[in-house]
Image (cartoon, grey):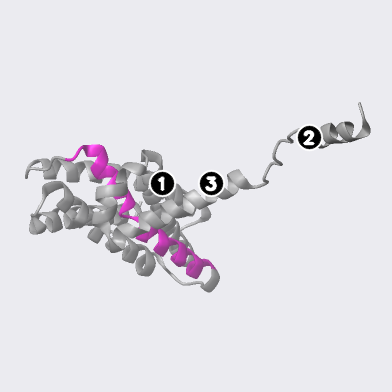
Amino acid sequence: MDSTSISNQTANVQPPLMPPAPVKGTIKTGFLADLFSRFVAALSIVVNPGNLLRSRLETFSWPWAMSVSGIAFFLFFLQTGLDLYRADAAGTGRVSLLAITGIVYGTAGVAFIGAVAWTLTRAIGGSRPVDWVIRAFALSYSPALIYGLLGLAANVLMGWNTAMAFGITGALWAIGPMTATIREVVGDKPWASLAIATFCGGLILFGWAWVSRL
């Protein structure tokens, strides 16, 4: 075999394929991107609730939806405790208890109020299942979560009392998305939707006022 054929065979030999180098941070980056996109989608219930309720609500699992209202009320109740602490009306133990109560209130409490709303809608022809209504009610508190974060920052950094200004304002913002939720359940009955959403929103605020005095 001459040197020319040997060189040609050598040139045709392909080097072994090497596995691609792992990309560091891909999983973490993907998780954060998914978390951010879901959070933005949850916030869209404020400006375009109908689109989220009709096309994207099913993509939010129970834990994801309930975490929105749970964190929102955790921040709300925590600020209530901090306001009381600043006024010498509560110690650190009560502040911690209120914060933990907020998590329970924002999950179990909101689920209960959602079940009440579902029961009322059934009486006027509602057809959506109870879990659908509860998840929609939980996501309705996404603006309250934003207000809670802003309020906590103002409370800690500036020394403001923020439970009323930020906490209640965020809770009131939820009435609009809740009204859209009820309307989606019962159809074209705007007054019934507004009445049920206002009643449920009032129960939420009444419960906060009662619990914060314990």
Q: Amino acid at mark 1?
A: Ser
Q: Which residues are magenta?
A: 128-156
Among numbered discs 3 and 2, the one appearing first in the sequence: 2
The quarter of the rendered structure image containing the N terminus is top right
* Residue indicated by mark 2: 12
Q: Amino acid at mark 3?
A: Phe
Which type of secondary structure does the marked residue at label 1 adopt?
A: helix
Q: Amino acid at mark 2?
A: Asn
Q: Is residue 143 magenta?
A: yes
Q: Taking the image as drawn, is residue 118 in sight?
A: yes
* Residue indicated by mark 1: 67
Among numbered discs 3 and 1, the one appearing first in the sequence: 3
Say whether residue 202 is left or right of residue 126: right
Q: Who is closer to the viewer here, 208 or 201?
A: 201
Task: Provide residue 19's location: percent of width, then percent of height.
Answer: 71, 36
Among numbered discs 1 and 2, the one appearing first in the sequence: 2
